[in-house]
Image (cartoon, helix red, strand yellow):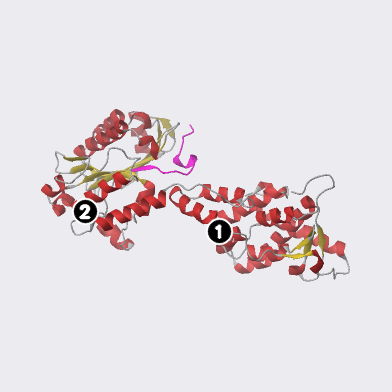
Amino acid sequence: MKVLSVRDLKPEDTLRLTFKGTINPQASIENELTPFLQSLEEYAGGWMPDVVEGKRRRKYSHAAIWKALEEERHDRGTLIGLYRTKWPALDMTLRLWFPPLPPELDLTSSMKPLHFFTEAERCQQLVEMVRAWASRYPVSHAWAHSSDDWILSGAPRFGRDEKTSRRDGFDKIYEVWWLNVFGPELVRSVGRERMLSTPAHRVEELPNGSILLVTWPTAADFASDAARLAQARAHAHLRPDLDFDTLLHGLRERSAALAPVQPHFHPDVAPLFSRVVDHVSSHERPRLTTELNAWQLPERMQWLPSSAAFPQDVADPQRVLERYSLLAEHLVAMLHIEVPSVRQATPESLTDIDFFFWREDVPDTRSREGLDKLAVPAVGAYLGQVLVHHLDGQWISRDKLMENQVLVGDRVWLPFIRAWYYLRSRQSLLDFSLTQLYREAERHRAPVPGNPPP
């Protein structure tokens, strides 16, 4: 049974929901979880899970959930996944913890895309579901908000070291999200009356002493200036020790950092840069797109005018050509599984290699000695062979590897020197990409009679 994971969709923001509620360890799992599932079924609507995953996947039902929980049970707890088979995507993890750990229902959910929660009525249904859960299962803190904004906020550490963050948790109001449930301890730390008077879209005291707070009618609109004003006002009210203007400035900066940026990539590297941007998390895309829009051709182009080419200085050029072919085959042997197109040695395979090396961060995760001794010669030879086979290039052989050249049109290119610069760092893979050198060489090849130059 195939499910639609949030990772199957293009990179974009998700609605993240976390809920941890106390359960009765003496009661049966069925009795404790049935109210939770009934509220989920009543309010989830268009994002209701239809698949349960334990040891295997089953169609959603209470019986399937009991079976999966039993399959995954261990001494201290159990864990299952809840998913959907169609849009919108849902990744929901439900854990139950048992003594000697604090008995707890622990839910983490990601719903994608965030813009699914643009309608006020759908958002209200989600709020009602969380309200029902929090009324039945006492919480210390629960929340729902944009995942991208949550990451940019510095959560969950909020400037603390990891040890302190794990020990103290959300022990004070570090941030106010779109949807919040503050447990009795947090209510006491702020003051019940003060919390109930928070300027917000909805503030409600629950029967067990927790307080539900919703800053704005819709979740997807969190980054609008009006929603940010509401968020800052609520936070400043709950934390009078913090400055409203400073809070608002930080929220607006986050909104600006998440605002979409249109790509205007240099044509030589547009196919590569588009794949790079599509690969990163959605909260990183605007910044990275801005950086790549500003990318400029490298100063070190690894070419010479043909008039300045080093003369051939080897006694047996054919033997050297066979060596280039062997070195290029080394790259094919290294990459043919991860980059199948490497076997074709086409201009497109250069882009595939560029992207693979960047994605795997090859320069910073492999031995420098191995890269310089093995990868640089293999990459340089492979690049040279593509220039020869697709741009009618001609090798000019030299005894020293780095001096070997490929003549294309009125320029000679130095593929081994290019490979050396290319493999210095992850950034250099983009600055000195194989894709870009090929496109530059393509513009300078001699035009075929009767055809315009590229």
The region drawn magenta spans 1-16
Query: Tag 1, which secondary structure?
Result: loop
Tell me residue 443's x, y (percent).
73, 53
Tell me residue 293's x, y (percent).
54, 53
Q: In the image, is residue 405 above or below residue 447?
A: below
Q: Which mark is residue 361?
A: 1
Q: What type of secondary structure mainly makes up the magenta span? A: loop
State the image quarter where residue 139 is shown.
top left
Q: In the image, is residue 39 above or below residue 362?
A: above
Locate residue 117 relative to residue 194 in the image: left or right.
right
Q: Which mark is residue 236?
A: 2
Residue 267 visible in this rendered orientation of the protein: yes
State the image quarter where residue 364 is shown.
bottom right
- The answer to which of marks 2 and 1 sits earlier in the sequence is 2
Q: Is residue 13 magenta?
A: yes
In front: mark 2 or mark 1? Answer: 2
Distance between mark 2 and mark 1 Cα atoms: 42 Å
Q: Which mark is residue 278?
A: none
Amino acid on which the number 1 mark rests in the picture: Asp
Picture residue at 31% right of the left edge, 38% below the top = 218
Tell me residue 381's x, y (percent).
74, 60
Depth order, front residue of 262/73: 262
Locate residue 146 relative to residue 98 in the image: left or right.
right
Tell me residue 390's x, y (percent).
77, 50
